[in-house]
Amino acid sequence: MTFYLEGIKLDLTQVTHGLRLDALDSTWPLPGQTIEETIRILSENFEVVRQKYAPRATGLVFPGEVHEVSLHIAIYYFFLYNSWKYSNPNEKDRSLAFSKDNFTHPYTYDRVITFFKLRYPEEYAVKSAILLAMTPDAVLKYEADRHAFYTSFR
C-alpha cells in the first residue's frame, strides 16, 4: 500500500508479524501494526511535528525540508513507541501518538541536525537552529557536548 504525506512517498507492506514501512530511503519493521492504524497515526504525528516547525521556516528552510524532517521525526518515534509496545509487556498499552515532550528530546535534536548536516554540510547549524529555536552556536555546542558525552565512555 502506497500513500503520501505532503508529496513524500511511503510504502507499507504486510509481513508475517505486522508491517514493513519503506520511506525516506529507510526501512522500518512495525510488528503488530495494521495498514489503517499506521496511516492514521503517522499522518497525525506528522501533522503535530509539521505544525511545530512550519511557522519557524524562513527563506533559509524550505517547506519541503520542513515536511521531510517532520516525517523523519514522526516515523522515528512511531517506530520507537511501537517497538516498545510489542516487545515489552509493561508497555502494551503505550500510546503511539507523538508526545510534545519529544520536541526537546536529544533524539529529536539529533534527527533535525543530521537531516540538515547531510544536505548542507556548510550551513546545517543555521538551518537546524531555525527549526530548533536555537542559535547556530548553541547547535554547535549541543553537538560538541553530545560527542563528548558519547566518547567519554570509550
Image (tube, rainbow, N blue to C red):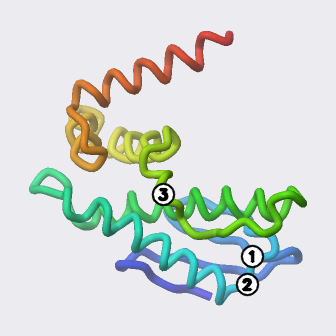
Which kind of residue does numbered mark 3 sit on?
A: Ile
Which residue corresponds to mark 1? 19
Q: Residue at x 51, y 14 (%)?
A: 148
Neighbours of disc 1 within 10 Å: few (<14), some (14-19), many (20+): many
Who comes first in sequence, dot 1 or dot 3? Answer: 1
Tell me, yes or no, whether the two marked residues, 2 and 1, touch with CB atoms within 8 Å: yes
Q: Nearer the viewer, mark 1 or mark 3?
A: 3
- Distance, label 2 to label 1, CA atoms, is 7 Å
Identity of the residue drawn at 47% across and 77% down: 9
Mark 2: amino acid = Thr
Q: Residues within 10 Å of mark 2 (few under 14, many from 20)?
A: some
Q: Residue 111: x, y in percent?
A: 46, 46
Q: Which residue is mark 3?
A: 73
Identify the residue under disc 2: 34
In the image: residue 58, left or right of residue 115: left
Q: Secondary structure at mark 3?
A: helix
Residue placed most toward the observer, 18 or 81 = 81
Q: Which amino acid, mark 1?
A: Leu
